[in-house]
Amino acid sequence: MKLKTAMLLTTGAVIAVPALVLAEGHMSDSMTLVSWGGAYQTSQIRAYSDPYQEMNPGVEVIWDESSNEAVSRLRAMNEAGNVTWDLVDVEAADAIRLCDEGLAMEIDHDEVLAPAPDGTPASEDFGDLLVSDCFIPQIVFSTTFGYRTDQVPEGVAAPTGACDVFDLETYPGRRGLNRQPIANMEWALLCSGVAYEDVYDTLETEEGIAQAFAMLDTIKDETIWWSSAAEAIQLLADGEVFMASSFNGRLFSAIEEQGQPIGMAWDWQMFDIDGWVIPEGLPEDRLARVMDFLHFATDTQRLADQALYISYGPARASSAPLVGNHADLDIPMAPHMPTEPANAENTFVNNYEWWADYRDDLDSRFQAWLAQ
Amino acid sequence: MTDAAAGMGRAASDARKLDAVATGPMLAADGRPLKASLNRALRAQKLRALALIAPLLLFILVTFIAPIADMLFRSVENQIVSETLPRTVIALEDWQETSQLPGEDAYAALAYDFMEAAERREHTRVGSRLNYETTGMSSLFRQSGRGIDDVGEIYADQFVALNPAWEEPATWVALMASERWQAEAAETETDTALPRFELAPGIADVLPETADAYRSFARTIMSEDEDDPRAEEPWNTVYLALYRDLLAGTGGYDGPQAALLNEAATAVPVFEAVSVQAQFADINEDWADTEVWETIEAFSDPYTAGYFLAAIDMQLTPDGIEAQPEEQQIYILLFQRTIFMSLMITFSCILLGYPIAYLLSNLPMRTSNLLLILVLLPFWTSLLVRTSAWKVLLQQEGVINDILVWIGLVADDARLQLINNQLGTIIAMTHILLPFMILPLYSVMKTIPPSYVRAAKSLGATDWTAFWRVYFPQSVPGIGAGCILVFILAIGYYITPELVGGRTGTFISNRIAFHISSSLNWGLAAALGSILLALVLALYWLYDRIVGIDNVKLG
């Protein structure tokens, strides 16, 4: 593996076309990509793998929809010594976990990924989003709120964000929230008056945790706790809840593609990153193919292309100006992006390192709190 | 065995004894004792029978028993700490005064272990493992993996400043490697793997820590990076080891590089020194916290009861076993809930299934076959589809509530909560598991001759008496089989409770699934699974004692 990257380095002059370097008959003819299914995977197929296959007609791309169990499957494959996946789409938190467990391959981003069109190295183009040495970001998405536009009480302004969830007086009705502590704990603190920069410090103290749970207690019985983001959309679409948290892309497709009476409440949306990891222990020929694909599929244009099909922001800074109109609906995508300034007045970023430490502890507390 | 039978058995064996005493063992035609000869014939038969089932046995062993045993074994296995940090674990054995930080030796041992682990990328796995026990270990280990390179750098610089030869890989190879290894390595062609590194004889007596650290360095870079120790400057931790060894003297060493070594030995006492503890505290101040060391010490054994304790809301602390803080106790509650709800589900299955099975077995063949298909139809539908259908029916804006509001039974603003709670789980799972109750009941009821009930009635029994005294006792084996099937299936269910259980209707299996697929705490998942298995076996045993397992019939 190191040998390969070293080879890439020595031929650094042609780093923009490593396909040529590696194509010396050592590349596997097929690869298995793993993603989340649904509209998101479709956007990846249309933006990444279809054009790649056009360029490389002999290559077979197999798509798997197992990302939600990627961590455990990769561990099982690794223990069995038979890794059948070549590239896996995971959330940043899972990428860190996989990297820690030695299940994902560490890469040098500047060697493997294409620079921006103006020559900015990949590591600068992705910037802070490179949260792990194993992780190649693709999109920025956010967990935010949707509400039923037809259930807003008369004479009241529509809800604008997370804190309206806790305001049962103004906005009566039930809520849908994720059945895990991440994001919920932060929202509870932010909306009970803790300043943004103190949130994680507060959550490290017993009083802070108690304060968050006290805030969540006010809506505990009015809340349906979902475990998959699709459930949240179903709850909204059926009118089961007035407000629910979900991924902004899912909300977008419910609103724009299915015409549901749902509005977006962006305030205090939580940014999260999704991207690729390469499983550890791939044979040389498959690794070469994956590297070649990765170089293509994460360049500036391809990331911008993906935003034509789904309302997630491209992870490269250089892709943002290239985002155009939705490919099928022909509406401008920029206003639906979590990164659009009008939507991003108050935001916070999932603090992966912090959660890597506190997740085990807080999760058991959260589940105990839920069960009581 | 009745008394009479026992008496007869005793009499027979007495007679045999008498026989044997009188005439010796009975012989077969070939002169062997008859018993042995019979046994031999039987053994051949048994072997043949075994050979016939051997493929199945092997299949079950390999695909079923072995994986389950392997998974359950993880509930006590904890080798990762002692395998990744072996020197530290040994050094901590002498650490009694847990209110104080361990000594320099333990910190040095940690430095050697950690450097090797970081190079092998194993340190973060230990961090994740220990983070299950103490919050913060994960990032402590991840961060320290980045900073460990600096431990010992201060000594490396001073050795090199003293004599630039210390920077040369060749110096180190000459000092540390055995002549045989050097010769073999010299003959190895480029691009092929070097022979396994070997220390020079005797060097470990003179410079014990250095020899150990250098061997760890040489072997690790060869296996991990395919690097050559003859071309690589050792890690800074090797210089740390050298410094510590030389402070203790060289013991009159006169092997290769003796002059260089003696020069260094006279120089080290005046080296600028920084304790290893301080160097670790520099990477992360938590290393100067006894809690971190207590955690490593508490989980240094290759086997641990920690997972099982966690699975019953207890924890292993340096002071012994304690209950978890109340706000974190969850598993006992979930076990109780799982058993209670599984019993409720089993009971509702009997209530609903019994009349249906009775109807099925008493109708003419043609009608009953049609009804049986209706029973089986949902059985052939995907589990997810059925569960989602219940969502559509039961939710507050769902079909049932709509109808109730339309009839006027409930007010529009007081719709019933039928789902996302225990009731939802019980309703959906009763429906899903109902065929497992109906089918054994049906097959048992089919075999009950209708003439018995007719006879009872003709002898004057009322309908109820005829049913309760004559028919029902004969159907009990069917109930038994149905109950066992439904209960055991219910206790391990997780998809349906996850989807319709809300916060009060989830099962222990939902937590097991979470630990398997999300938190990767497979040890805890295995412990929870083992307890669940033990519970099922215990209930089965109880059932055998109360009802009797002979009293179970599937048809």
Image: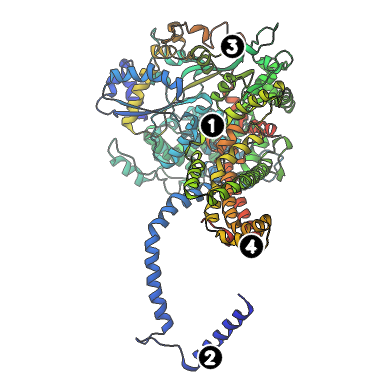
Which of pointers 4 and 1 lies earlier in the amino acid sequence?
Answer: 1
Q: CA distance from mark 1 to mark 3?
A: 59 Å
**Residue B152's disc number:** 1
Quadrant, the N terminus of chain A: top left
Kind of element beneath mark 2: helix
Q: CA distance from mark 4 to mark 3?
A: 73 Å
The location of residue B125, given as percent across then percent down, is 53, 36
Disc 1 residue type (three-letter): Gly
Q: Which residue is mark 4?
A: B458
Task: Using the image, name the chain to which the residue with label 4 belongs.
Answer: B
Between label 1 and label 3, give the one nearer the viewer.
3
Q: Which residue is mark 2?
A: B18
Between label 2 and label 4, give the one nearer the viewer.
4
Disc 3 residue type (three-letter): Gly
Task: Using the image, name the chain to which the residue with label 2 belongs.
Answer: B
Q: CA distance from mark 4 to mark 1?
A: 100 Å
**Which one is nearer the viewer's eye here, A292 or B455?**
B455
Q: Which residue is mark 3?
A: A263
Please report the residue visible at 48 percent of the width from the left and 13 percent of the height from the top. A257
